[in-house]
Structures are given as structure tokens and as C-alpha cells.
Amino acid sequence: MVSLPTHKETDGIKEFIVDKDEKATIIFKCEGVLKDILYYLAKSSNTYGNTITSVITEMITTTLKDKHSYTFDKTLDALQSRSVIRSGEAIPYHIKSAMENAIKFSNPAAFADELAAGKITAAEVKEKVDTANATIMSLMEQGYNPNDFHPNKKSFGYKWSEGSWIWEVSRKSDEEEVVSINGREVTRLKAAEGDTHYLQYIDNGITIICPNIFMNALYMSYPERDEYFNRELRKVDLQHQQYKNDGKEYDLLIDECCPEENVSEAKKIISASGNEVIGAHMVKLERKGARQYRYMCIDVWNKSSNTYQQLVFMNDRGANKEATTKPFYQVFTKVEQKSRKKTNKKKDVEIAFTDEHI
């Protein structure tokens, strides 16, 4: 006989006890169109979260509550992803401003001079302090840590580089993992199992300067970005550019930054059957006398052959950018490891030494 898990019932509503240490896996097959819809919801602006797991979990828990009056005593892990700051995300400017002001005014000492001068009452000070603390708590519930807003904190550029650039360029699965970066737990998508194409970056001397340039910078307005990204974007005269997350951004980036004679080829590669763009980064090339130059890199994965191509390009960005840019276009692929040549040379004369004297 099947029975419900441990729960308590109040006014007809069953509240189930969640054991965070107890995990289960459900695998089900479905039509491809359904998976595509769930993936679209996960990657679009929504209240579900950015994984298929979180979308399904949200839909299931909503149905359980509305149709069966089933609830849970804790927020399920998959739903917490909606409010967790992801590795690879900059903090929006309006959030920075709200948190910094709230931290400042959460301390009554901020109003000491006004209070002494009679410009404000003690009751008004208390009200402002309470409002500031309420703002801090609200932002913390959304996943923002007040410690990340310290005026002397490292820039986001350092933050990501202390993480894993290999993770940044890897394909992502629908599952999540919790990792520790600089002593802080960060929830992020797991890298796809078996994806080792980061070796192409190493073998071809491609170094990531700004990972996932759209998500971390180009989808945002100038003031919303971390200064690290704006500083690097100035080197290619893109600091004031902003793109929409509508599927056309890669073509537009090629139009903007690729040499004119290579635009057609680049667009054919990213749109070819079986190809999928899995990332766009700002990079440099580890070549003598060329490390100061910045390029755009579009990473393309072919699902059928499980192969990867990195389109690295930059066009003439004007006379004032000659120190950091120059026209360039190259498609990088896997570097095959050179096999060692085996030698089977026969010795013409063999001499044996003994301890005996002749």
C-alpha cells in the first residue's frame, strides 16, 4: 500500500516535511517539442529559474498546492535557484545602489549630525533605520550578500578569474552543483559530462579575458555592468553597446566586429545545420608581441560530430584603438596530438663488456 510522506495537516492543507539530505531522481521520456518548450521557459525571463529542473519543479509544486492543497515546510532546492547569484553574473547597478544606501542608513550613526542639529527626530531616525534594514533583508532573500558590496571588494573580473575559466567555456547541463569560490558557496549549472574542449583554448593559445560577454556585459546597459567589463570593452570601442537576448545577437556581433570579407563565412558556420553557439567571449591570443590585442570569440559546437570551432575575429576599430585591436579572423579547431616517431634502427656492431681482462 502506498502512503504519503510525513506531514502535518492544518485546515485541510497538508504540509510535507522536507529532508534536504534525502535526494531522488526521476527520469522520464517526452516528445522533443515539450523539452524545447521547457528549455525556452528556463532560458527566458521568467519566475521559474534557469534550468529545466526548476521549471518542472515549479509547475509540479504549483499544481500540488492548487489542486491537492499539498505544501512543503521548506523551499525545495530547485526553486531556490531563482534567487541565487550565479557564478558569472555581475550585480545590476540598481541593486548595488539600493544595497549600498541601505547598508549606510541601517546604522543610526549616519543620522547623528542631523539629529544633533534638530533637522530630524529620533522617531524619524528609527523609521529610516528600519526601512534600510528591511531593504537589506529583502535583497538577501533574493540571494545578494551584503559582504559583496564592500567598497574595497575586488572587481568582478578578479572574482570570475579566481573561479574556473574551464567551467565558463564548457557546455552546461540542466543539473546544478554547489561549489565553493573564495569561501563562498555558489550555485551554478554543472558542466556537460565529457566536455573537454577547453583543451582547444589551451592548445591554440586562446586566453579568456571576459567570459560569456553577453550575459556578463552586453545584455546590460553601461551603468549596470561591472567596471572590469566596461574597461575591457573600451579597448574594442563596445562599452556603450547593448544587445537584446533575442537570438540575433551573435549575427549582430559579427556585423559589428568581424572583418567584412569574413562576415558571410562566420554567419554560415554559426547557422549551419547541427551547429549550436555555446558561448561568446572576449579573448586574447598568446602570441609574441600580440597579447595586448583583444578579439571576440564565438564558440560553436556541432552536436552530430561532437566537435568544436572557435571563431576569433576583430575588425578595424579606428585609429584610437590601434594599440588594442587589429583586423583578424581565424577559425580554430582541435589540435591533433603529434604521434611520436618510433625508431627501429639496427646497430651495425654490438660490443659486450665483461669484468674479465683479456
Image (spheres, helix red, strand yellow):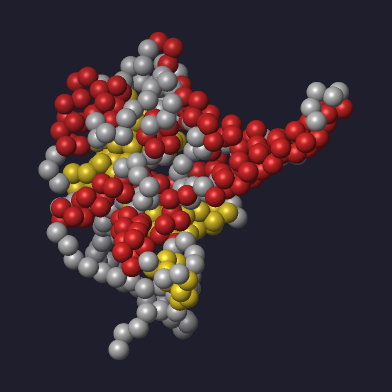
Quadrant holding the C terminus:
bottom left
- The answer to whether residue 34 is left or right of residue 193 is left
Q: Is residue 226 visible?
A: no
Q: Is residue 211 above or below residue 82?
A: above
Residue 195, quarter of the rendered image: bottom left
Residue 90 appears at what percent x and percent y?
49, 38
The residue sitting at 50% across, 58% down in the picture is 179
Q: Is residue 252 above or below residue 108?
A: above
Quadrant holding the N terminus:
bottom left
- Judged from this view, the residue extending furthest toward the right is 116
Residue 215, quarter of the rendered image: top left
Along the line of sight, which residue is nearer the eye, 282 or 72?
72
The residue sitting at 45% across, 43% down in the picture is 88
Residue 224 appears at what percent x and percent y?
49, 29
The residue sitting at 24% across, 64% down in the picture is 344
- Judged from this view, the residue extending furthest toward the left is 273
Residue 334 appears at what percent x and percent y?
26, 47
Residue 282, quarter of the rendered image: top left
Along the line of sight, which residue is nearer the eye, 213 or 330?
213
Q: Is residue 119 visible?
A: yes
Task: State the count of labels.
Answer: 0
Residue 16 appears at what percent x and percent y?
44, 72
- Judged from this view, the residue extending furthest toward the top is 319
The residue sitting at 26% across, 50% down in the picture is 39
- Judged from this view, the residue extending furthest toward the bottom is 1
- The answer to whether residue 354 is left or right of residue 252 is right
